[in-house]
Amino acid sequence: MRSTWCPRIGQANTAASQTRAPVGEGREEGEPRGRLRTGSVLADLDRSDADRASTIDGRRKGACLFCQEYFMDLFLLAELKTISLKVTTVNMLKPPPDFRTNFEATHPPILIDNGLAILENEKIERHIMKSVPGGHNLFVQDKEVASLIENLYSKLKLVLMRKDEQKSAALLSHLGRIDGLLAKRGTRFLTGDTMCCFDCELMPRLQHIRVAGKYFVDFEIPTSMRALWRYMYHMYQLEAFINSCPADQDIINHYKLQQLAPKQFGTSPTMGRARAEDTAALKMKQHEELETPTFTSTIPIDVSELNNVGEQ
């Protein structure tokens, strides 16, 4: 089932005044963070970011790339105590009356700031940058990185359509260029040793490439891309990524629904793609709801070697 995954943000909570780790660094278990909760209703806070959740059980975090990207942005700001953060999920097939009244058929992501709803991806990004406390620090200027990660996801979508060596080679080549930049710069993240908006964009896409690519067409990121694997090693240590990452099953189901919806419902002008996917979700086998969620986070090369990448 399709749901809304709702990170909600407000001004920093003064009660949680203990020191948090800087952006891009992990924290010890139990260290305070922006308020984070998973539930089934849309609660009222100063700001909120409504994101899509699991298409399997209607409660877990879902596989919407934009939702995870924006939530990671907000989580990093919560770590810096510029905002407080709470997450809830809303079943989009059976949304609560208040959500239905306020947003009708609008699909996530949705950003709510003091009652003002921002519904479009570009506007959400601009709002985080200009209006959310500390948000401007995440949006760095780096034309090389911006150009490099552009269109990566479109190459994955082409690969998933059917197994095709040429399309797989194009995706591998693109990943190779990212690996080359990381090796050349020798930094933990794309633009330095602290995270920025580009990392929040790239990391969810790498996870989709790894999980969905392997499942549908047996695509794997080569172990020879050591700088990229070093990057993913750090990615898997991040609280922002860990708390926002969907289960493998939800990533796989996300693409199953995309493939199933056109086959079952065609391209009817009366049924949008999102609605078709919602309807298809109802027809998925019930055993998927009972399957224990898994989260791929292993690194296939010796971690002790990763610190030397970029120094050779």
Image: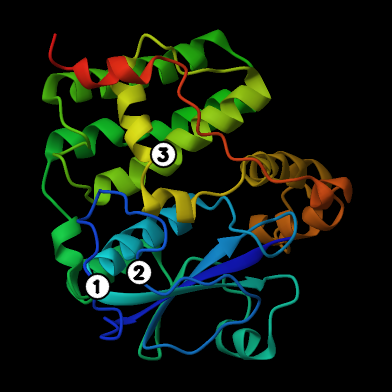
Q: Which image quarter: residue 127?
A: bottom left
Q: Which numbered marker is on residue 172?
A: none
Q: x, y percentage for residue 184?
A: 13, 19
**Mark-to-mark CA distance, 2 and 3:** 19 Å
The answer to whether 140 is drawn above or below residue 114 in the figure is above
Identify the residue position indicated by label 1 in the image: 18
Q: Are marks 2 and 1 in contact (CB under 8 Å)?
A: yes
| 241 sits to left or right of 259 | left
Alpha-carbon neighbours of circle 1 within 10 Å: few (<14), some, or many (≥20)? few
- Give 207 or 109, whichever is nearer the viewer: 207
The front one of 237 and 149 is: 237
Q: Would you name the residue on which mark 3 appears?
A: 236
Q: Secondary structure at mark 1?
A: loop
Q: Measuring 66% from the left and 55% from the top, which residue is drawn there?
A: 273
Q: Is residue 1 above or below residue 118?
A: above
- Mark 2 touching mark 3, by CB under 8 A? no
Q: Residue 46 appears at what percent x and percent y?
A: 36, 88
Q: Which of the labelled discs sits on residue 32, or is there none?
A: 2
User: How far across and down, in percent of the image, does residue 233 sit?
Assistant: 37, 31
Quarter holding the C terminus is top left
Q: Amino acid at mark 2?
A: Pro
Callout 2: few (<14), some (14-19), or many (20+) C-alpha neighbours within 10 Å? some
Q: Earlier in the sequence, mark 3 or mark 1?
A: 1
Q: Is residue 14 visible?
A: yes
Vertical side of 157 occupied by 102: above or below: below
